Image: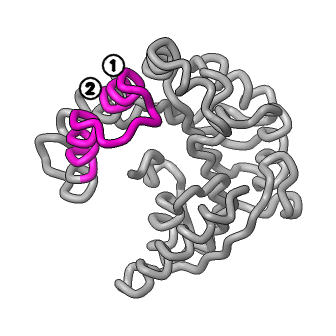
């Protein structure tokens, strides 16, 4: 499930790209398709890094890797990279987990080159607020979301740390009802038929990308998009 629009990242020859909080490597897998990219994925979870490695090796086996890549475990507030190391940074669904969000953004500014692109996505306010209201368990999950961003608060946070706004859009409207349903049925419960059925539909949609559901998702994103995606450029 790709949240970031790679057409907005301005990837050029010999682009150094950082995917911070890479998770299972969904965005990193998309980045290394580009021959001109050296992509670095970081995450605090070693399990996530193992998943990312398996994903990238699978892409390489399928002949889908054009660029080069590396992985490391690191904290977003103490990145192990020199100043101005990267041309592009992806920070997808990370900041809502970080207690010291200001220090995190300062670090992203430090390691990004002047003129570089920073793409940030977080859960959108309204869909996330509904999840918090429906389920106390969702809100209290270990290593879960500790805040909900409004669009203005997110933009202000990043702009105050040396960036200017380049664009914004919403994504994954079809995923919003799934999370509402999951919260309604309690997030930790398994084997719930409606939740499992909807999850199977989402997996099918991600793999097959039928035109009808892509059109519906695009149509509903301004209203129900699960994530807000904001693009910045460093001064």
- Mark identifier at residue 137: none
- Mark identifier at residue 223: 1
In-front residue for pair 44/105: 44
Q: Which residues are magenta?
A: 177-203
Q: Residue at x 50, y 76 (%)?
A: 54
Q: Main secondary structure of the magenta part?
A: helix
In-front residue for pair 16/61: 61
Image quarter of the C terminus: top right
- Contact check, label 1 and label 2, Cβ < 8 Å: yes
Q: Position of residue 5 (x, y in %)?
A: 44, 48
Magenta stretch: residue 122 in it? Answer: no
In-front residue for pair 55/34: 55
Asked whether, in this view, residue 81 is left or right of residue 115, the answer is right
Q: Position of residue 164 (x, y in %)?
A: 68, 32
Q: Position of residue 134 (x, y in %)?
A: 44, 15
- Mark identifier at residue 220: 2
């Amino acid at each position: 499930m790709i949240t970031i629009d790679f057409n907005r990242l301005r990837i050029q020859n010999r682009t150094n790209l950082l995917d911070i909080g890479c998770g299972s490597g969904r965005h990193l897998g998309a980045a290394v398709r580009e021959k001109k990219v050296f992509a670095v994925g970081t995450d605090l979870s070693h399990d996530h890094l193992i998943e990312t490695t398996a994903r990238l090796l699978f892409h390489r086996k399928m002949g889908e890797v054009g660029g080069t890549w590396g992985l490391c475990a690191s904290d977003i507030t103490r990145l192990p990279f020199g100043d101005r190391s990267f041309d592009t940074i992806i920070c997808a669904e990370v900041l809502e987990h970080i207690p010291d969000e200001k220090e995190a953004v300062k670090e992203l500014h430090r390691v990004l080159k002047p003129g570089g692109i920073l793409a940030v996505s977080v859960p959108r306010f309204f869909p996330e607020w509904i999840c918090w209201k429906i389920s106390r368990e969702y809100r209290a999950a270990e290593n879960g979301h500790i805040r909900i961003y409004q669009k203005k608060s997110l933009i202000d946070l990043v702009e105050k740390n040396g960036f200017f706004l380049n664009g914004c859009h919403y994504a994954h409207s079809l995923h919003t009802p799934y999370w509402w349903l999951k919260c309604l049925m309690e997030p930790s419960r398994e084997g719930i038929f409606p939740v499992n059925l909807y999850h199977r539909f989402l997996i099918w949609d991600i793999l097959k990308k039928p035109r009808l559901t892509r059109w519906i998702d695009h149509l509903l994103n301004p209203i129900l998009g699960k994530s807000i995606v904001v693009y910045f450029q460093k001064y």
